[in-house]
Amino acid sequence: MSLAVTDAGGDLFAANLKGALLAVASSAFVGVSFIVKKKGLRRAGAAGTRAGVGGYGYLWEPLWWVGMVTMLVGETANFVAYMFAPAVLVAPLGALSIIVSAVLAHFMLDEKLQRVGVLGCILCIVGSTVIILHAPEERSPSSVEQIWGLATQPTFLCYAALAVVVSLLLMLYCAPRYGQANIMVYVGICSVVGSLTVMSIKAVGIAVKLTIQGENQAEYFQTWVFVTVSAICLVIQLVYLNKALDTFNTALVSPIYYAMFTTLTILASGIMFKDWSGQSASVIASETCGFLTVLAGIVVLHSTREPEQTISGDLYTPLPPKIYWHIQGNGDVGKQKEDDLLPRDFITVVRQDYFV
């Protein structure tokens, strides 16, 4: 009996180790993709409408596609990691992408990471590490039908419905009004939708793993429901992540996205798989401290944000209609009545780089 328990424990450790290594590799690729994609977004924005204001010119930018392929490699490794390890272990290891993207952005994008910003990154990583160390073990489902049963529990259905409502509110109401000024809008959409993505990706991963082992899961409609949900959520994440990267500093987007996404993923996993039942008060207190540490890191990072200059899509922008001063023909400064000045006669050069 003890030998069987030891073998089971060794198999679990080996599986978790594979998942952890794949998650680390995934984070490295994703961190690099942040930088490459942003350089592509900048090139595309210089030639046309920026992604942050609704443009899709980056789809014709080769450098953006290089970053996209890099991200796909990372996400593929992440997908395989969920086959071996629980979400509470895989998701927090995305902290590595923060370090990679912040360091590369400092050297390649001239997005300076201040010392206080480094402290914010450290707080996020430390807090997430505390969550990992005290996170409960996930019960690994043995079939897609079993996951479907977990996904249709009333508690998780409530979470999923709330996530959908919040995402729609952010996309339809907040994004058009506050998306360009508040980083939490775009990143919030990616994080909330991402928590649903992980749950569906976990189901698809188990289906693929069981199919490889000889138990065909393609014959169950639940498998294709999870595949559809995964595809829809991934597209939404991609669109709004591009908007966030194009609008805000990469060294700020990466940690906030990581912290929010990881927290919501652990929450969704706990609700769906009932991982939080049976924990002691000390473990719950440790998890709470880790969560508060992550939030502190987010606040520190947000306070160090350097606003980027947004470039208007138009070459010229009209001045406000109330103009009283002008230069007369003899070089003297005189005052003119407001009614005598036409707004169309005055323009402001926004893109001075077009002139020599």
Image: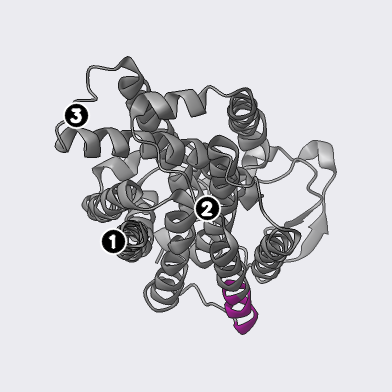
Say above or below: 150 vs 48. above
Q: Earlier in the sequence, mark 3 or mark 1?
A: 1
Q: Amino acid at mark 2?
A: Thr
- Magenta stretch encompasses residue 129: no
What's the CA distance linking mark 1 and mark 2?
36 Å
Q: Amino acid at mark 3?
A: Glu
Q: Residue furthest front?
A: 1
Query: Which residue lies at the image location 16% right of the left edge and 38% below the top edge?
Result: 213
The residue where tag 1 is placed is 18
How many numbered marks have been drawn onto this rendered protein structure? 3
**Which residue is at the front of the view, 284 or 31?**
284
Q: Look at the image and give the residue range highlighted in magenta.
A: 115-122
> Dot 2, crowdedness within 10 Å: few (<14), some or many (≥20)?
many
Q: CA distance from mark 3 to mark 1?
A: 22 Å
Residue sitting at x 56%, y 54%: 136
Image position, residue 208 (x, y; %): 23, 36
Residue 317 occupies quadrant:
top right
Query: Which comes sooner in the sequence, label 3 or label 2?
Result: 3
Q: Position of residue 29 (x, y in %)?
A: 30, 62
Q: Residue at x 48, y 48 (%)?
A: 138
Who comes first in sequence, dot 1 or dot 2?
1
**Which three-letter amino acid code belongs to the residue tagged 1?**
Lys
Q: Alpha-carbon distance for marks 3 and 2?
A: 46 Å
Q: Tell me the number on the disc at residue 247.
A: 2
Would you name the residue on which mark 3 appears? 215
Instruction: Tell me the residue at 51%/50% (across/down).
Output: 244
The residue nearer to you, when weighing 75 against 303, is 75
| Above or below, comparing residue 115 to residue 212 in the picture | below
Considering the image in quadrants, where does the C terminus appear? bottom left
Between tags 3 and 2, which lies in front?
3
